[in-house]
Amino acid sequence: MTQPSCHVHINWDNFRHNISLLMQKGHTLMPVIKADAYGHGVLKAAAELEKAGIRWAAAGTLEEAAAVRDTGFSGHIVSLLSPVPDRSDVALALQKRLVPLIHNREGLRAVKAAVDKLCPARPLDIAVKVDTGMARLGFPLEDMEEVAAFLAASPALNPLVQVSHFSVADEPEEDDYTVRQRDIFSRAAAIMHRRFPAMRCSLGNTAGLAGKHSDPDDICRPGLALYGYNPLYGTSKEKECAGLLPVMDVSAPLVSVHPLHAGESLGYGRTYAADSERLVGWVAIGYADGYRRNPSPGTCMCVNGVRVPVIGRVAMQMTCVDLTDLPVPPVPGDTVYVMGGPGDAVSAQDLAAWWGTIPYEVTCLLGRNRLD
C-alpha cells in the first residue's frame, strides 16, 4: 500500500483530556474503540485506556478485541460485532479473555456447544444483548426468562454484562422513547438478576451519560465524545457535554498555485468558472483519501488559520480551493488543513454538515490515511 499524500495527526493529550472529562460524570466507563477507534487507532487508544485505569473497553470484532488485549489492556473487552460464534471464535475468546456479544438463540446455542467441547478451566464471560427498541441485535424482552434459564443450566457460560443501545438519546425531543428503552432494559435486567445477581449492566452511550438517562450503576459506553465531538451538538442539552477537545487533525500539501482568469473553468465537468480574476490552489487530497466527491456549497479548508472555499469537483487525489482573499498568497508545498489545525479550524461536525453525514463517518473515512 502506498502512503497517502495527506497526513493524519492524532493528539493523544486531547484524548486523555476527554477521558478525564467523561470520568467526572460519575459512571464506570466502557469506552468504545471499535472500527479502529473511529479511525484514530485502536492499539494506541487501548494503551491510553489502560494508563487511565479504565477497566472495560468495547471493540468491534473478536479479532479487534484480541488486538486490544495484545496491547496489554488488562480489563474486560467486549466484542460488539459478534456473528454466530464457531469453535475457533470461542477458543480465541477463552485464550484472550474476551467477552463475545450474544444476541440471538443461534449464538447462545453455538457458544454453549463450543465451550462444552473445549472444556475450559474457567467459564467463558459473555455479554447478553437485549433489543430495547433499536430492532438491530438483541433478545426481545419476552425471551429473557428463557435466556436466563438456558444460562443457569450452562455453568460454563457466565453472563458478565447485559447490554443494549439507545436509539435517540442524542435527540432531547425523543426523551420519551429513551425512557421507554430504559424501562425495557431494566425489566430484562431484573429477570437476569434473579439468577445472576453479580451481572453488570451497560446501556448508556455518550448522550445517555451526558443527558442523565443512565442508572447510577450503569457502565456507560462513550464513543464519539472520546474523540472530541459532542453528540448533543445543536440540541438543548449541548452544554451537558461541553469541553471536549478534537483528537484528529488532517492536513495535505498544496501541490499547485496559479491564477484563474475571468471566464476560465477548472476541474472535471467544468463545474466552476471564474467570474473574476482568482488565485486557486490544488490540495493533495481527494475521494480516494476519504474526502467526499460532492461536498455542498460552503465547504472549506484552512490555510494559515483562514478558511478558504473548496471549488469545482473533487478529484481522486486532488481538491481545488480558492486562495484569492488570503492576505498572504501561499506557495506549493504549504500545508492546508482539511480538518483541525490552527485558527478558524474546520471540525468533523463542519465536514459532516457539508457532506450530509455525521462526524463518526468523517473520522472513520479520513482516519484510514493514518500512518502509525
Image (cartoon, grey):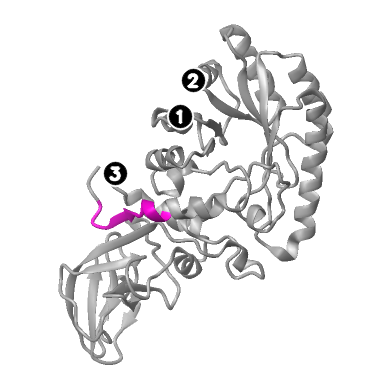
For the point 51% across and 64% down, the residue is: 243
Q: Secondary structure at mark 1?
A: helix
- Report the residue at 33% width, 66% height from top: 341
Q: Quadrant of the C terminus?
A: top left
First along the sequence among labels 1 and 2: 1
User: Dot 1: within a 10 Å radius of its alpha carbon, few (fewer than 14), some, or many (20 or more) residues?
Assistant: some
* Residue wearing tag 1: 63
CA separation, marks 1 and 2?
8 Å
Q: Looking at the image, do the residues carrying marks 1 and 2 touch, with CB atoms under 8 Å apart?
A: yes
Residue 372, which numbered label?
3
- Label 2 sits on residue: 92
Magenta-tinted stretch: 4-14
Quarter of the image that includes the N terminus: top left
Residue beneath the point at 38% across and 44% down: 41
Q: Is residue 246 left or right of residue 108?
A: left
**Disc 3 secondary structure class:** loop
Which of the 4 quarters of the picture holds residue 120? top right
Q: Is 11 one of the magenta-colored residues?
A: yes
Image location (x, y in percent) of residue 90:
55, 19
